[in-house]
Image: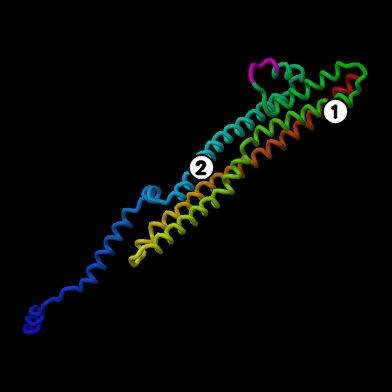
């Protein structure tokens, strides 16, 4: 046993081959670069076409978020105003007093209040004419309410088309950046005289895939917000139509009472 240990200690350890040492060194360097992975470095070192597409995606993202915050406030305000006006309208107040209250306020009307004001104003204007029957009075009020309701919905739908376009085209724009990034990387590797490895291909592929990821990050919130806002506008449109029909019934009864 003792002689075996002495023989083992006496053996000399052979040095590793130089190729193995270089391979280990390169692997450690690649691991160090992977550990210091930085998205900003990928953007800075990206090719010019990819940087241009990334800039477009950043502009599209900023635009979409501006639209999202503004549209969220507009639809929330329209829903709140509709709730408050319906509460006042169905509280039993006289139509003339309610109309006077809407016209005396020094503020812009919108939503159900604007529809009510337009319909009742047109109804009173036609009723002051002589020889006009109840049907003509009602049809005039309905036309005024439809026109005002269309303008209100058009204001609510403003910029929704742009939001939908951003959400639908951003992934394809990012994919174009990916294609350009891969093309530039492949051409640079083909023109290189030395033998290339994964460490040479990884930066170009990473910047190319980053463009696709940016396109998805732009598209996902835009599509989600568009679907939510479109549903909100549709619900408000249903409320506007229902109120117009109910108010038309009230005006019809009042027009027959005046005859």
Q: Which residue is drawn at 71% across and 35% down?
A: 239
Dot 2 or dot 1: first in sequence order is 2
Residue 251 lies in magenta, yes or no? no
The circle on residue 61 is: 2
- Write down the residue under mark 1: 139
Q: Give the main secondary structure of the magenta stretch.
A: loop
The circle on residue 98 is: none
**Label 2 Cα crowd, 10 Å radius (few <14 / some 14-19 / many 20+):** many
Report how far apart the C-alphas of labels 2 and 1 lie in the structure: 46 Å
Task: Indicate left or right for 5 with 239 as reference.
Answer: left
**Label 1 Cα crowd, 10 Å radius (few <14 / some 14-19 / many 20+):** some
What range is drawn magenta here? 103-107
Is label 2 or label 1 in front? 2
Q: How many labels does the image show?
A: 2
Task: Indicate left or right for 251 with 109 as reference.
Answer: right
- Which secondary structure lies at badge 2? helix
Q: Which residue is drawn at 42% across and 54% down?
A: 207
Foreground pick, 151 / 120: 151
Residue 104 lies in magenta, yes or no? yes
Picture quarter containing residue 238?
Answer: top right
Residue 85: x and y in percent read 68, 26
Render colour scheme? rainbow
Q: Is residue 30 visible?
A: yes
Residue 14: x and y in percent read 15, 76
Please say if 74 is above or below 29.
above
Quadrant of the snapshot with the C terminus: top right
Q: Which residue is drawn at 24% across and 71% down?
A: 20
Foreground pick, 216 / 98: 216
Q: Is residue 90 visible?
A: no
Residue 91: x and y in percent read 72, 24
């Amino acid at each position: 046993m003792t002689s075996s240990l002495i023989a083992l200690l006496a053996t000399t350890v052979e040095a590793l081959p130089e190729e193995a040492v270089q391979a280990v060194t390169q692997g450690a360097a690649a691991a160090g670069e992977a550990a210091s992975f930085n998205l900003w470095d990928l953007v800075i070192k990206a090719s010019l076409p990819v940087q241009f597409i990334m800039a477009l995606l950043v502009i599209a993202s900023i635009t979409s978020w501006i639209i999202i915050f503004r549209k969220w406030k507009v639809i929330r305000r329209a829903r709140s105003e509709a709730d408050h006006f319906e509460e006042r309208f169905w509280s039993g107040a006289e139509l003339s007093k309610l109309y006077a209250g809407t016209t005396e306020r020094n503020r812009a009307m919108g939503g159900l209040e604007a529809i009510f004001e337009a319909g009742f104003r047109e109804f009173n204007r036609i009723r002051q004419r002589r020889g006009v029957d109840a049907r003509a009075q009602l049809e005039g009020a309905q036309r005024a309410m439809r026109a005002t309701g269309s303008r209100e919905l058009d204001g609510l739908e403003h910029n929704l088309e742009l939001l939908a376009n951003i959400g639908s085209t951003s992934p394809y724009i990012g994919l174009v950046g990916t294609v350009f990034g891969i093309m530039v990387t492949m051409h640079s590797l083909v023109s290189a005289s030395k033998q290339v490895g994964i460490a040479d291909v990884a930066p170009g592929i990473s910047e190319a895939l980053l463009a696709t990821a940016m396109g998805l990050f732009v598209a996902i919130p835009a599509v989600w917000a568009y679907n939510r806002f479109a549903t909100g506008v549709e619900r408000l449109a249903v409320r506007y139509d229902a109120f117009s029909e109910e108010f038309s019934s009230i005006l019809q009864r009042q027009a027959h009472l005046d005859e």
